[in-house]
Each structure stands twice: as C-alpha cells, then as structure tokens.
Image (cartoon, rainbow, N blue to C red):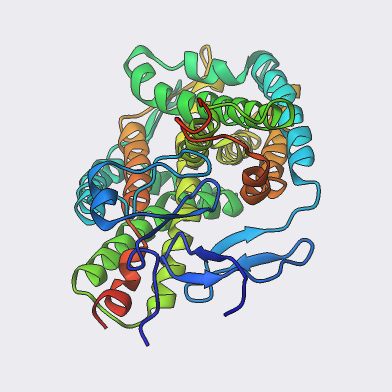
C-alpha cells in the first residue's frame, strides 16, 4: 500500500497551529487558502524549491572561491603587515599552540560550508534523478544541514570583534579584509538554499509514483 | 477506525494518527523521524518568563562594555553595537550590516515578537495579528545568531589572550546568559498549546 500523504489526500497542514485543513487541489494553487483555525496562509510545497535551491547554491559555490583566496584579516604593526586568509589564519593558530581555536575555526569556516555545498548539491541531484534509496538517511542529512548552517558565521564575528578591539596606536591594527563579506555571503546563501529546499521531495518517488 | 486525530508531517507530508502524549514526551514522524510536537507542562508561562528575562539581558548586553583589551598601557574596549559602528566605511554596509542583522536586529525581533505573542495570548487571545506574528517568528529565528556571536567573540578573545591582557565585561556575561535564555524559549513553547488557546476566527465568521 502506498503511504498516504496530506498532499494526495487534499489536506494542508498549518505549520503554525498544527491543524489539518481540507482544500481542493486547484484551490491550493490559485488563491493560497488560509488556515481555518489561525488564518495563516498555507501552501502545499515550498514554491520552485529545486530551481531556487540550485540557484542559491551555485551563487554560494562561486563566492566560495574569493572567500577562501582573499584575506579575511589584515594586520599591520611596526614589524610589518600581514594578510591572513581563512586557511592561513587556521595555520597561524595551529602553529601558535592554540589548537582548540584552530579546530573551532576549521570546523566552522572550512568543514561546515564545504559540507553544506556538497551535501545540498547531492540532495538536489538525488531528488532530480528521483532516487528511491536511503530516504531516511537523506532526510536526516537535510535536518543536520539546517541545524549546523548558522555556525559557519563564527569567523565573520571573530573578524569584526578583532578589528574593533585591536586598534592600538603604534602597536598593531587589525582590519577586516575583503574575504569577510564574500564568506558572509556564502553562509547566508547556503542557509537560504537549505531553506528553499523542500524535504518532501525526498519522499516523492515513494508516494507519488509507487 | 479509532478516533485519534490525524496530523501530517511538515517534512515528508505523511498523514498519521496523533499518539496519546505523556508528560514531557516528544512525538516524531513515523516515516522520516522529524520532530512533530511535544508536551510541555505550563509551557507558555515558562516561555513568557524566559522571554522577559531575554529582553532585559538583551538591553544589558547592548548597553554595557562587552570586552576590553590592554597592551602596554594602551586600552581599547567595545560594546556590541560598537563592533558594528567601528568598521571602516568600506565595510560598514556589508560586514557591518551582516553583523548588525544577525547579532542585534534579528535577536531583538525574535525576543520582541515572542514577548508580544505570549503576552497577547495571556491577555487577549483574539487578536488578528497572531498568525502574522507566528510567521514572522518562523522567518526570523534562523537568522538570530546570539549563540554564534558568543562563540565568535570567545574565539577572538582566545586569539588575543596570548599577547594582551583581555578583560571580559558585563556585556559579554549578559550575552552568554541571553544565549541560554533564548535557547530556553522554544523548549517551553509548544505551538499546539498555543493553538489551543487561540480563539481567532477567520474573517467573515466573527463579524455577523
């Protein structure tokens, strides 16, 4: 027996109050019905989920290059100036003996953005090809993406706080480099892409076609 | 057929029966294991208390000195808004805007809307704007990053701590407490209980 879904039964779940609303298929498309209990506008799916997620993901992937190649911090002191990219900053922390900090930045700034780009890309590909395997694992992967995404913003905050605090006349000045905004944009775009992706697509091959 | 009410999973759309809910229990989707809802005794009152705490802590965190730095008699210090305002002109509009949005504006919106929602539910649960408030809350929450801001500040201090004397101000302590208070709001905040108290009527039905 095919699993029964709300979409096929002509029902819409209100995400705010949890009420199941009855609606005709055409009605759902044409005039965005409101929840009978709380009045929230309802829709069966996130609109244009795949193309929006893919567009945002591609934009993030393009900005990933300047985010990693350009300097994120520029330090100037009487002993010379130094321009640090994300990776050289991590190396600096690692060799300087603060490996816990290096590890935090490595996870937040390198591993999480990379994992988000690759994982969401793979999810989009699997949905596009209507794969039927590993649905539960893919659903869990998606939930993990939603949870960890925000933490890659750490480095932007580090750069902002450092550049504000280290303004010591004659000793050292730190300022934010051009990679900071590219990196911030990668974080924002991947978060938007994750939110645009509709996890119901993962389950579609089972319910719609089976 | 049993009389248990039906519900649908917001992540995979599967229709399923609502199981009887024990105190403090959580319900997950039978197919994709997504979290559906939970039972929180006294949830709304507790959430209101946490939200009020968060509002006070937010004001303290934004007004008082967050961190200070001293190197050879030269001192600098900053508040949370100071981090944004001190960025050089070229970065004020992009990095500054990003930090301001995720570190100040979105948390303020989250706390404000939560307080409004819970207060209105207690005092006058017939307001029209409640669905709008719920929707705003859902859109704002992912972008409110007090927890990430605290981590970022601690990492920055850790970097400086080897070469300079760093002192932690009231602002950072308040920010840490704010992080905990804000994390505690959703745990006491069950939308089902909220919906049960909601007596809003769709337009047209209550005008007669």
Residue A45 in the figure: left or right of residue B148 = left
Is B86 in front, or is A91?
B86
**Residue A58 coordinates in the image, percent (x, y):** 20, 50
The quadrant in which residue B1 appears is bottom right
- Give the residue at x 44% y 26%: A79
Above or below residue B4? Residue B203 is above
**Residue B158 coordinates in the image, percent (x, y):** 63, 39
Quarter of the image where the N terminus of chain A is located:
bottom left
Can you see residue B8? yes
Quarter of the image where the C terminus of chain A is located:
bottom left
Is A29 in front, or is A116?
A29
The quadrant in which residue A32 appears is top left
- Give the residue at x 36% y 40%: A188
Above or below residue A4? Residue A34 is above
Can you see residue A162? no
Q: How many marks?
A: 0
Residue B131 in the figure: left or right of residue A6 = right
Is A207 in front, or is A107?
A207
**Residue B102 coordinates in the image, percent (x, y):** 49, 31
**Residue B49 coordinates in the image, percent (x, y):** 79, 33
Above or below residue A158? Residue A3 is below
Which residue is outermost to the bottom? Answer: A1
């Amino acid at each position: 027996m095919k699993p029964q879904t709300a979409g096929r039964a002509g029902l819409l779940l209100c995400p705010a109050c949890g009420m199941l609303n009855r609606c005709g298929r055409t009605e759902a498309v044409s005039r965005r019905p409101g929840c009978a209990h709380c009045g929230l506008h309802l829709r069966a799916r996130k609109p244009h989920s795949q193309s929006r997620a893919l567009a945002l993901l591609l934009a993030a992937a393009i900005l990933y290059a300047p985010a990693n190649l350009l300097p994120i911090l520029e330090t100037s002191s009487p002993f010379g100036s130094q321009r640090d990219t994300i990776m050289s900053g991590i190396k600096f922390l690692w060799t300087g003996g603060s490996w816990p900090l290096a590890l935090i930045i490595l996870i937040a700034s390198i591993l999480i953005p990379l994992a988000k780009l690759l994982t969401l890309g793979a999810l989009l590909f699997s949905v596009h090809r209507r794969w039927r395997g590993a649905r539960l694992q893919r659903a869990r992967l998606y939930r993990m993406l939603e949870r960890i995404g925000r933490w890659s913003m750490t480095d932007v905050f580090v750069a902002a706080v450092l550049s504000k605090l280290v303004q010591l006349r004659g000793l050292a000045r730190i300022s934010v480099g051009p990679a900071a905004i590219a990196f911030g944009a990668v974080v924002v775009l991947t978060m938007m892409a994750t939110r645009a992706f509709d996890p119901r697509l993962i389950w579609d091959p089972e319910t719609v076609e089976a | 057929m049993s009389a248990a009410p039906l519900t649908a999973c917001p992540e995979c759309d599967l229709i399923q029966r609502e199981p009887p809910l024990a105190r403090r229990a959580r319900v997950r989707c039978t197919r994709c294991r997504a979290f559906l809802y939970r039972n929180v005794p006294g949830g709304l009152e507790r959430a209101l208390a946490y939200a009020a705490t968060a509002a006070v802590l937010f004001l303290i965190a934004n007004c008082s000195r967050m961190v200070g730095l001293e190197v050879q008699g030269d001192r600098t210090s900053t508040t949370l808004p100071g981090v944004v305002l001190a960025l050089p002109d070229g970065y004020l509009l992009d990095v500054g805007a990003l930090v301001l949005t995720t570190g100040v504006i979105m948390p303020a919106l989250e706390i404000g809307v939560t307080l409004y929602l819970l207060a209105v539910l207690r005092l006058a649960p017939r307001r029209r704007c409640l669905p709008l408030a719920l929707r705003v809350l859902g859109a704002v929450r992912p972008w409110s990053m007090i927890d990430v801001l605290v981590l970022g500040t601690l990492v920055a201090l850790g970097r400086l701590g080897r070469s300079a004397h760093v002192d932690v101000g009231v602002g950072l302590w308040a920010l840490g407490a704010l992080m905990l208070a804000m994390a505690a709001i959703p745990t006491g905040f069950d939308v089902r209980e909220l919906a049960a108290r909601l007596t809003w009527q769709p337009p047209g039905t209550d005008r007669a």
